[in-house]
Amino acid sequence: MTATLRVVLDQLVAPTTTELAEASRELTRALVAAAPRGADVGAIVPRGEFDAPPGLADVTTLMLPRRELAASWPLGVAPGVGPGLIHAPTLLAPLVKHDRVHETHQIVVTLWDLRPWQEPDALPRAEVLWHRAMLKRAQKHADAIVVPTHAMAETLAQIAPKAATRVRVIAGAPPADFRVPTDAAGRLRTLGLPGRVVVLDAPDPVAFGAVPADATAAVFVADAHAMETARAVAAAAGVAADRVIPVPAADRHDRAAVLSVADAFVATSRVAGWPWRGVEALAAGVPVAAVDTPTHREVFAEAAVLSATGDLRGAVAAVRGPAATRLRVLASDRGRSFSWREAAERTWALHAEL
């Protein structure tokens, strides 16, 4: 008898962020490739157009669109899903009371960062309340909660102590085809990137304050609507507006092209979670200067120069100096330690353990 692991792929129907959509697709592809004998992969999706990853054994399409699904599942209303092995690459899952032993019904969810708890003022109130409601249900009904780092697992155990024994660590990875595109030069011209750049993980005061005066431009990957706010923040940090260039997050090839001309990647986030762009920088062999946090120590390891917030400019100078060549090699080596294939194998092992 074949066991089917059904993956909740709402992000491929109505994506909320580029990161979650890419993670959902990449993990599903890897799960298909790594499926053990006697097992296959299906999908659970809300109503809507769906670009299915290749190799799915079946697709359960629900009656509700994603928005209505996100409103009903926190209330425990999940008709049409049915029992079985269910894996959610996000926190959106049909978290209801179930019998794991007699019905072979498992529900595993994934939490990629703790912004709704650590930086709630930076998010819409509705988004914060939704995440907190879903984590509350996960504490009651999830058989496991997957997080990407041990640092995040420790913090989550304090936020959701009832789920501490069910937290599992499975790291994310860059997209499988994340590499410098053959048309990189043309993409860089289109994006308006002049010469060498410093890439920031977020357009915040600490990051802009660390941008060296001789850098041609400071680049950050974000949605276009963040641009005006970013220019104001940059100006307050002494970085001229014409040196601040946003790169849309949606196209991984654009992101890879930008990193191909980067002298440094600057990571300033203090939120426990997965540093998506930082890991892409590692894969591209870009030296990393990062604020010293448990997450950055765990993910970047020896491939980054870590510093206190107030001395981040010195860390940027260090990774652009004589140590740059050595750090590029270390970054590339570290980047290869993260893969969706390994994440998929560990996911299959988790469901087998359950």
Image: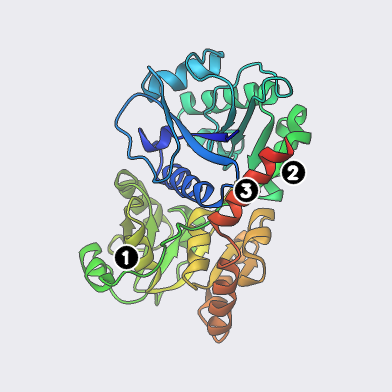
Label whose residue precedes the other's in the sequence (3 or 2)? 3
Report x, y in % for residue 290: 58, 63
Q: On residue 243, which mark appears?
A: 1
Report x, y in % for residue 73: 51, 18
Please rate how many residues cluster around mark 3, counting C-alpha atoms within 10 Å: few if below 14, some from 14 to 19, many from 20: many
Label whose residue precedes the other's in the sequence (1 or 2)? 2
Q: Are marks 3 and 2 in contact (CB under 8 Å)?
A: no
Q: Secondary structure at mark 2?
A: helix
Residue at 50%, 47% (x, y): give it: 32
Residue 267 in sight: yes
Residue at 46%, 52% (x, y): give it: 204
CA–CA distance between discs 3 and 2?
11 Å
Residue at 70%, 49% (x, y): give it: 151
| Left-right relation of 67 to 206 | left
| Left-right relation of 354 to 338 | right
Report x, y in % for residue 111: 59, 38
Q: Are marks 1 and 2 in contact (CB under 8 Å)?
A: no
Residue 171 in sight: no
CA–CA distance between discs 1 and 2?
39 Å
Which part of the image, by quadrant, shows the C terminus?
A: top right
Q: Secondary structure at mark 1?
A: helix
Report x, y in % for residue 5: 56, 35
* Amino acid on which the number 1 mark rests in the picture: Arg
> Which mark is in front, 1 or 2?
2
Q: As drawn, which residue projects farthest toward the bottom? A: 322
Q: Which residue is mark 3?
A: 148
Q: Which residue is mark 2?
A: 154
Q: Nearer the viewer, residue 203 or 330?
A: 330
191 up-or-down from 269: above or below:
below
Q: Nearer the viewer, residue 157 or 27?
A: 27
| Left-right relation of 155 to 210 | right
